[in-house]
Image (cartoon, rainbow, N blue to C red):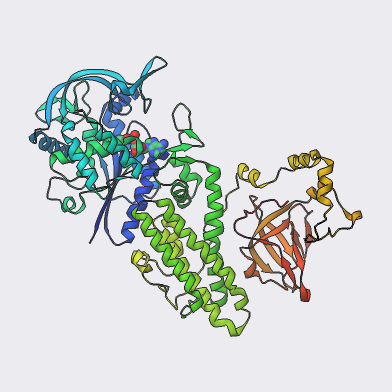
Amino acid sequence: MTSFYVTTPIYYVNGAPHIGHAYTTIIGDVIAAYHRQLGEDVFYMTGTDEHGLKVQREAEKVGKTPLELADENSGKFRALFDRFKIKYDRFIRTTEPEHARVVTELYRRMFERGDIYLSKYEGWYAAADEAFVDEADTEEIDGQRRAKESKAPVEWVAEESYFFKLSKYQEPLLAWYRANPGCIAPEARYNEVVSFVAGGLQDLSISRTTFNWGIPVPNDPKHVLYVWLDALTNYITGVGAFSDDPNWRKFWPASVQLIGKDILRFHAVYWPAFLLSAGVEPPQRVFAHGWWLVEGEKMSKRAGNFIDPNELVEEYDLDVLRYYMLREVPFGQDGNFVRARLAERNNAELADNLGNLVNRTLKMMERYTGGVVPDVKPAAEDEALIAAAFAARDQLHACMQSLELHKALEAALGLSGALNLYVHQNEPWRLAKDEATRERLHQVLVQATEGIRWVATMLYAFMPGKMGTILSALGCADEASRALDTLGAWGGLKAGITIVAPDVLFVKMEPPAAAVAEVTPKPAVEDKKEKSKPKQEKKMTTENTNPAIPAPVAPEGNLIEFDDFNKVELRVGLIKTAERVEKSDKLLRLTVDLGEPEARTIMAGIGKTYGPDELIGRRVAVVANLKPRKVFGTLSQGMLMAADAADGKVELTTFTDAVAPGTRLG
Ligand code: MSP
């Protein structure tokens, strides 16, 4: 069985977790879940980095021992990951005795290789980054010397230190990069690292004597090991390095090591160099992701804009949060956490696209077959849909290999969109009206439901909660029936099972003010523009001499001013539910989403033309500021725009998915 080992960085315990920590750990969880779905033997590890000057100083500041502080904060990370339902196989702490064993052994091997020597370090040290910084990489800001890149304060250090012969590994590292072009990703990071190493490497100080919160150097315990040598080793401790633990053979070298871009050098230069020195294979791939800003600002204690991921879990559905974080940012680039965008994506992509597809399709299955899946084969005309499903599945796999997670999501949501269109075009509600089209009705319902199974299986690693609900409804309750190889052939949905449509999956969120402003024309400005136009120009536009353009239909006396027209608020409404009104052959009771917190109830006299099922999901034009009035005992809060057609029928004004509910017409 193929094995797959994925890691996150281990997090410093000098503070509580923030959104950046949650992000990497969610990504790791998605990648691990995807590989489990592929049937691979997966090991996913995260944990906490507990030694070093930074932690010791914070402990002194708050009047605790370093271990007390580590226990407390490590517990917060673990609790957070439990709240996020992260399925890690091991949570490692660098204060575990087992870790000291592995670090000591790694050091011994490096020493035996002749790669460690005693000397003196004199230079700058940034405790916040736990990094030695070259003089040229520091700058003076407001009387404080800082590291140029991270802006962390630096302090002068002069002490006896053990050094690692990093310079000796310049060529071996370059050879390793060349032989494994995928070992550092994305490509821009690979290039960055290669040119850094090609520029020459200095030996690295790997021990400190001026504090003691760390693992002692073997045979010279007045030194503690440099915290990065200690921390990086966690990745091999976790799988039982240098022991007869079967995990060691099975899972090392790691398949993917996820990190943030700020710790690239440690993982792409120091880490493989340590391993090469100790005779251990370097990891297969180190992937550096970008950083999250919050509402356009860098997160910092000073700005007070740290997002506590615990609050996010309370505020948002976990699956929606996972979706947003992975969909919003091209993986590898920086992201901007904007609550308004989260609501937009939830509403448009999850509620309107996927949620709507599941709801309408499975409700129709309930209505027309009692929920029992008919035993039918697809028709020739369904081939395009099936081909789209295979293409989406292949794209998902390709994107998961290249770790373009946002594109993997795009592939699955694209298939959901194609399925919505398929339902719309095949009009099961019409097919249901005629006994002669029963077979086709069944075919359409089964293809759409099978498509939903595909989408839910593709998205299961990303949104295990909601997709689990869908898959259970489709008779796929155990993990085997949710595996990706169930998408090997079209038609895995079992005939004869009974489907009960789940409750609404994705609840709409209030659209943020900014989004409404974007889609609403600003009448005051328009008005001014109109008025400021020169008279001559205005005349030229109304005096139409082109015979191809029909003359205005309104007689001169009926013309209204723009201001009058502007009083009518026409908006796009998305029909959420529709039902017939008892004792009326014409009236339908609809709930219509106008981009407001609550959907409106609208009574519409269109029941002779349209059945309830074919209306759900349609976007229509609504007069939004008509005074509410009672129709058949129900308060109707708007009017749908429609034109009379032949035979007493009507035709609604409709829009495609490209137009958001609430958009004003004008
Ligand atoms: N302890 C080291 C890692 C040792 S791994 C052997 C460390 N810890 S950290 O807690 O400071 O950072 C952990 C991870 O969080 C890093 O990958 C870092 O890039 C990431 N992030 C910190 N702030 C972040 C954002 N604002 N956005 C995204 N990730 C961010 O470094």
| Quadrant of the displayed image that contains ligand 1 | top left
- In the figure, is residue 293 to the left or right of 69? right
In the image, residue 659 above or below residue 650: above
Place of residue 663 in the rendered image (x, y in percent of width and height, measured from the top left): 66, 51
Q: Position of residue 135 (x, y in %)?
A: 29, 20
Q: Is residue 466 visible?
A: no
Residue 428's place in the image compared with 234, above or below, is below
Position of 118 with respect to 550 (left or right) is: left
- Write the residue at 54% across / 45% down: 341
- Above or below — where is 172 with respect to 3? above
Residue placed at 19% from the left, 35% from the top?
170
Residue in the foreground of this view, choosing between 385 and 24: 385
Residue 152 placement: quadrant: top left
Count of numbered badges drawn on the protein: 0
Tell whether 464 sits left or right of 3: right
**In which quarter of the view is residue 217 placed?**
top left
